[in-house]
Image (tube, coloured by chain):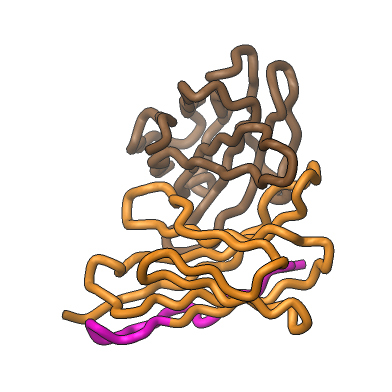
């Protein structure tokens, strides 16, 4: 049973455009929602994370929007650059829980020059 | 930048061989994890450890085994490799967070295993 559903599976955006990746979770006990970025041949690296006490968090060109009632959160990449081309994974976890991160299926982003 | 290392980075072996994938971290993290990931696909947790002499199976069933004799070291072993084991194996670690904080997982670069 997949507890975190991620879409789209792949995304192609022109340089300077906005990239939007969506995730939906099922477990209402989740209270930590990170996004990981993975380049080919590398392990994933934490990009940005949010807790449900805020509806939005911004770090540079990367923004997480969180909708607690809909159990959805999304990653927005403003002014997308070719260097942003990577696979992005959303994840969810209940803080303090013995359970580990539950990852989405990933989105392969390609930013065209 | 996290200090977590995996060796080898690439491994091509024949069926039936015993292999050990190494993972080490120098951050003193108490938790360590092994994930299996096919190219471009999601990560599946196969093993995790809360500390020395503590190991648990993950969500995805795996024929591999792990050990945690030292805090910094979390090797994964396949007693008899098969082509179905061909995949990328990612090691990660995290620390016990402060109250109210979540534990960030830091990933190694991965080992790409091919079993012929």
The structure residue drawn at horizontal position 73% and vertical position 50%, both measured from the top left corner, is B59
The structure residue drawn at horizontal position 78% and vertical position 82%, both measured from the top left corner, is A69
Is B112 or B94 nearer to us in this picture?
B94
Is A10 or B77 nearer to us in this picture?
A10
* Image location (x, y in percent) of residue B116: 40, 43
Query: Which quarter of the image is occupied by the N terminus of chain B?
Result: top left
- Residue A65 in sight: yes
In the rendered structure, which segment of residues is drawn in magenta?
A1-19
**Quarter location, residue B65:** top right
Is A4 or A54 nearer to us in this picture?
A54
Q: Is residue B93 left or right of residue A88?
A: right
The structure residue drawn at horizontal position 74% and vertical position 39%, both measured from the top left corner, is B99
Q: Is residue B65 left or right of residue A13?
A: right
* Image location (x, y in percent) of residue B92: 53, 38
Total numbered labels placed on residues in the image: 0
* Image location (x, y in percent) of residue A34: 58, 59
Residue A5 within the segment the image draws in magenta: yes
Residue B57 within the segment the image draws in magenta: no
User: Which of the chains is brown?
Assistant: B
Outermost residue toward the top in this view: B69
- Residue B111 in sight: no
* Image location (x, y in percent) of residue B113: 42, 41
Outermost residue toward the left in this view: A113
Q: Is residue B18 left or right of residue A82?
A: right
Q: Is residue A107 left or right of residue A71?
A: left
Above or below for B49 versus A74: above
What hue does chain A carry in this figure?
A: orange
The structure residue drawn at horizontal position 42% and vertical position 41%, both measured from the top left corner, is B110
Above or below for B70 versus B60: above
């Amino acid at each position: 049973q997949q507890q975190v559903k991620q879409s789209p599976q792949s995304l192609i955006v022109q340089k300077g455009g906005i990239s939007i990746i969506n995730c939906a979770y099922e477990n209402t006990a989740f209270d930590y929602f990170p996004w990981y970025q993975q380049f080919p041949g590398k392990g994933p690296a934490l990009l940005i994370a949010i807790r449900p006490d805020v509806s939005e968090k911004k770090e540079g060109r990367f923004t997480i929007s969180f909708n607690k009632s809909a159990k959805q959160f999304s990653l927005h990449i403003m002014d997308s650059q070719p260097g942003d081309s990577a696979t992005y994974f959303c994840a969810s976890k209940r803080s303090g829980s013995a359970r580990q991160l539950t990852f989405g299926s990933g989105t392969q982003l390609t930013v065209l020059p | 930048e996290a200090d977590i290392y995996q060796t080898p980075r690439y491994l091509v072996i024949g069926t039936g061989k015993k292999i050990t994938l190494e993972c080490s971290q120098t951050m003193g993290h108490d938790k360590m994890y092994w994930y299996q990931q096919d190219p471009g696909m999601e990560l599946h947790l196969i093993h995790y450890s809360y500390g020395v002499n503590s190991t648990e199976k993950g969500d995805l069933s795996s024929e591999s085994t792990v050990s945690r004799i030292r805090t910094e070291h979390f090797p994964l072993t396949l007693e008899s490799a098969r082509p179905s084991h061909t995949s990328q194996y990612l090691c990660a670690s995290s620390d016990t967070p402060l109250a109210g904080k979540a534990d960030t997982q830091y990933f190694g670069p991965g080992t790409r295993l091919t079993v012929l």
